[in-house]
């Protein structure tokens, strides 16, 4: 090798176009584990559920060998439509209440002194350390007709004697809000933490009152946090079945209960799968429309943050 | 019109920190009034008090004859240009500028006309549809200024508006600010730590230190006739000497004894009696350098020294001259034939001379 070669080599290394190829390899090898994970534990099972929805059921509770469209058509009958509608409005109500509570809390925590912030966040997270079912049972005690909450409210006259808090829709909504609230507060707090509060002063300076500054500047500023919180609450709420099962009453059945009933008690897996597919489509279709329709206009990572939020589900 | 904007005996503490101490300032209508001081001297707090973001512990704020001390920011005819510009990131430049008029309930057609005119004035019309993160620092600055001025405030507060820009852009924006001030004629309260900015823009400057106003005056008054040691050393370079008045020559001049240097003549502006302990300030550019002992000149003082350091700065050269262990800062403007002439060099024994009127005397009260 002549000296000219040795001098040429380092420069060709630094300027070579090869990093593109190598970068791609690096990228793929780094992403591969999570891609495989998604493939085997998400894509394949989802495809299986989708396929089972078009199978016939056999009498022993297994899956028949022939294909049919009947089960999926069955899902769209009147009885299911009622439950579907109920599921959607309950989920919206729970999400709306969660956001209404989480926005002020997230704002407030992010405005506190650094010393207290972590303690406050700890308080938000502590309920999650206890098992979900145990917390629901605790709520059964609290909301019981002879429980502390109802007796207190009745005695000070806020609710009349004949109003009950357990085994009805109120109970389902209260407990759902309670279970999901932490998950709504965290993303809103995170977005609020990044928010530049001098913008609120600028808005006040330009003549906006406190409330208008809050609505016109703060809320758009934490938009991503709100979207994330919405998805993190709304999607699990659509699929919830333990809460209506434990604190709901007659007429509190949601789609999740139907799926659980078909899969466990009835052993009609194709029908359970069919309801699941319909539920998944109910979430996915508006969602995809939103990401690709609304997301395209935004040059920044708005759509990316939303897809990140989905993948966390 | 006088005293359009006034702070009267304003005092403010944050916990233990007494940041604004009994401050009184008054600005005339249409002028540029600067608050100049090192960081942490309380100038930004004063601006926030003027804007309504802080309430003074005591004292009052007056604008156009009215006491506005208790008014919230959105109720004052005062607008602020924030140090980080504080443009709303989710709005276009157009919507940012239109924010104030829209909040005020102006009709959309009128908003459109006014915003268009404003963006035209600062040459930002072409960028109206961009978002703040798509334009440069200087452009953001201009948008922030018209976003405030479109509300036709009685008072525009500017908080270190050029601090985030690089040197060239800063010089350009200074001219631009001056032009905008000429166009609108609004009263500007300008906070800065940069004496050049304050000097070039202001009609009056209030020099602040440690929560107090040290001196208020025109740029020339403050430079030529500093009231305190702090002002003398903060505005421009200077040489400060501790001295004692050793004798009174006549109604105008006195003899002063500078510790370590000897006796000299100086103008006795404040009529100090003999025996007073005072501080003398002599600007570096007031000295002249001579290779040989100059023949006694009219009203000049001179002393022998040794050059210990030379800093060539293009338009001028800075010399550090040692006299009896004291270092004196001397600045010489270059003349036409700098390279042709023999220049003083390191370790040269030279003479420095200064006129007795070039000495500013300060009482030895505060540091």
Image: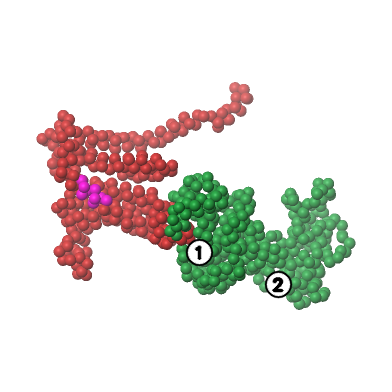
The circle on residue B363 is 2
Whether residue A118 is visible, yes or no, is: no
Question: Which residue sits furthest left?
Answer: A59
Q: Are marks 2 and 1 on the same chain?
A: yes
Q: Position of residue A207 (x, y in %)?
A: 46, 61
Up the image or down, B321 lies above or below B58; here it is above
- Magenta span of residues: A84-92
Q: Residue at x 42, y 62 (%)?
A: A209
Disc 1 is attached to a residue of which chain? B
Q: Quarter of the image holding residue A67?
A: top left
Chain ID at mark 2: B
Outermost residue toward the front? Answer: B109
In the image, residue A143 sits, relative to residue A88, either above or below, namely: below
What is chain B's hue in the picture? green
| Mark linked to residue B77 | 1
Q: CA distance from mark 2 to mark 1?
A: 41 Å
Work out which quarter of the rendered image holds the N terminus of chain A and state it: top right
Judge by depth and name the residue closer to the eye, A218 or A261: A218
Question: Mark 2 against mark 1, which lies toward the viewer?
Answer: 1
Q: Is residue B324 left or right of residue A141?
A: right
User: SS at mark 2?
Assistant: strand
Q: Is residue B360 left or right of residue A168?
A: right
Q: Residue at x 43, y 59 (%)?
A: B105
Horizontal side, residue B14 vs residue A274: left or right: right
Residue drawn at (55%, 66%), measured in percent from left and top? B46
Q: Main secondary structure of the magenta part?
A: helix
Q: Is residue B3 at all visible to an observer of this figure?
A: yes
Q: Residue B86: where, in percent of width, then height?
A: 49, 54
Q: Quadrant of the C terminus of chain A?
A: top left
Q: Position of residue A260 (x, y in %)?
A: 18, 44
Give the drawing colour for chain A: red
């Amino acid at each position: 090798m002549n000296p000219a070669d040795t001098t040429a080599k380092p420069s060709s290394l630094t300027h070579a176009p090869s990093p593109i190829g190598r970068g791609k390899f690096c990228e793929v090898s780094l992403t591969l584990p999570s891609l495989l994970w998604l493939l085997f534990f998400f894509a394949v099972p989802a495809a299986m559920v989708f396929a089972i929805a078009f199978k016939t059921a056999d009498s022993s509770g297994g899956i028949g060998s022939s294909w049919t469209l009947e089960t999926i058509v069955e899902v769209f009958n009147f009885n299911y439509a009622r439950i579907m509608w109920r599921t959607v409005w309950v989920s919206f109500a729970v999400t709306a209440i969660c956001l209404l509570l989480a926005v002020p809390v997230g704002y407030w925590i992010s405005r506190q002194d650094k010393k207290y912030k972590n303690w406050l966040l700890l308080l938000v997270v502590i309920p999650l350390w206890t098992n979900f079912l145990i917390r629901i049972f605790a709520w059964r005690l609290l909301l019981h007709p002879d429980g502390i909450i109802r007796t207190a409210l009745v005695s000070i006259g806020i609710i009349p004697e004949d109003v009950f808090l357990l085994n009805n829709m109120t109970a389902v909504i209260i407990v759902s809000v309670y279970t999901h609230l932490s998950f709504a507060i965290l993303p809103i707090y995170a977005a609020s933490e990044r928010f530049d509060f001098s913008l609120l002063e600028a808005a006040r300076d330009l003549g906006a009152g406190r409330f208008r500054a809050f609505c016109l500047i703060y809320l758009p500023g934490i938009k991503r946090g709100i979207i994330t919180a919405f998805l993190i609450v709304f999607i699990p709420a659509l699929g919830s079945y333990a809460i209506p099962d434990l604190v709901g009453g007659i007429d509190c059945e949601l789609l999740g209960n139907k799926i659980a009933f078909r899969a466990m008690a009835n052993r009609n897996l194709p029908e359970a799968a069919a309801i699941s597919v319909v539920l998944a489509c109910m979430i996915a279709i508006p969602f995809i429309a939103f990401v690709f329709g609304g997301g395209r206009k935004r040059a920044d990572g708005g759509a990316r943050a939303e897809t990140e939020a989905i993948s966390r589900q | 019109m006088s005293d359009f904007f006034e702070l009267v005996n304003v005092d403010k503490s944050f916990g233990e920190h007494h940041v604004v101490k009994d401050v009184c300032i008054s600005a005339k209508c249409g002028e540029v009034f600067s608050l100049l001081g090192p960081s942490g001297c309380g100038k930004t707090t004063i601006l926030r008090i003027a804007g309504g973001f802080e309430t003074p512990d005591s004292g009052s704020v007056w604008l156009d004859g009215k006491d506005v001390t208790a008014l919230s920011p959105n109720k004052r005819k005062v607008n602020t240009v924030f140090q980080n510009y504080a443009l709303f990131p989710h709005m276009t430049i157009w919507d940012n500028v239109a924010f104030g008029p829209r909040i005020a309930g102006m009709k959309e057609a009128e908003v459109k006309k006014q915003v268009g005119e404003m963006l035209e004035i600062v040459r930002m019309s072409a960028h109206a549809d961009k978002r703040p993160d798509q334009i440069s620092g200087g452009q953001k600055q201009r948008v922030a200024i018209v976003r405030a001025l479109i509300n036709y405030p009685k008072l525009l507060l500017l908080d270190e508006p050029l601090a985030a820009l690089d040197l060239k852009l800063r010089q350009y924006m200074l001219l631009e600010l001056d032009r905008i001030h000429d166009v609108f004629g609004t009263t500007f309260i300008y906070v800065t730590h940069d004496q050049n900015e304050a000097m070039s823009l202001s009609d009056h400057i209030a020099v602040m230190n440690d929560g107090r106003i040290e001196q208020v005056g025109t740029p020339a008054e403050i430079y030529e006739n500093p009231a305190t040691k702090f002002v003398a050393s903060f505005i421009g370079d200077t040489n400060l000497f501790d001295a004692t008045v050793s004798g009174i020559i006549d109604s105008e001049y006195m003899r002063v004894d500078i510790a370590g240097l000897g006796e000299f003549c100086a103008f006795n502006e404040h009529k100090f009696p003999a025996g007073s302990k005072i501080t003398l300030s002599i600007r570096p550019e007031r000295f002249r350098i001579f290779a040989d002992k100059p023949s006694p000149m009219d009203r000049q003082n001179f002393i022998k020294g040794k050059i210990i350091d030379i800093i060539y700065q293009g338009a001028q050269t800075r010399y550090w001259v040692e006299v009896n262990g004291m270092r004196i800062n001397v600045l010489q403007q270059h003349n036409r034939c700098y390279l042709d002439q023999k220049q003083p060099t390191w370790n040269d024994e030279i003479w420095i001379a200064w006129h007795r009127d070039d000495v500013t005397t300060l009482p030895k009260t505060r540091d």
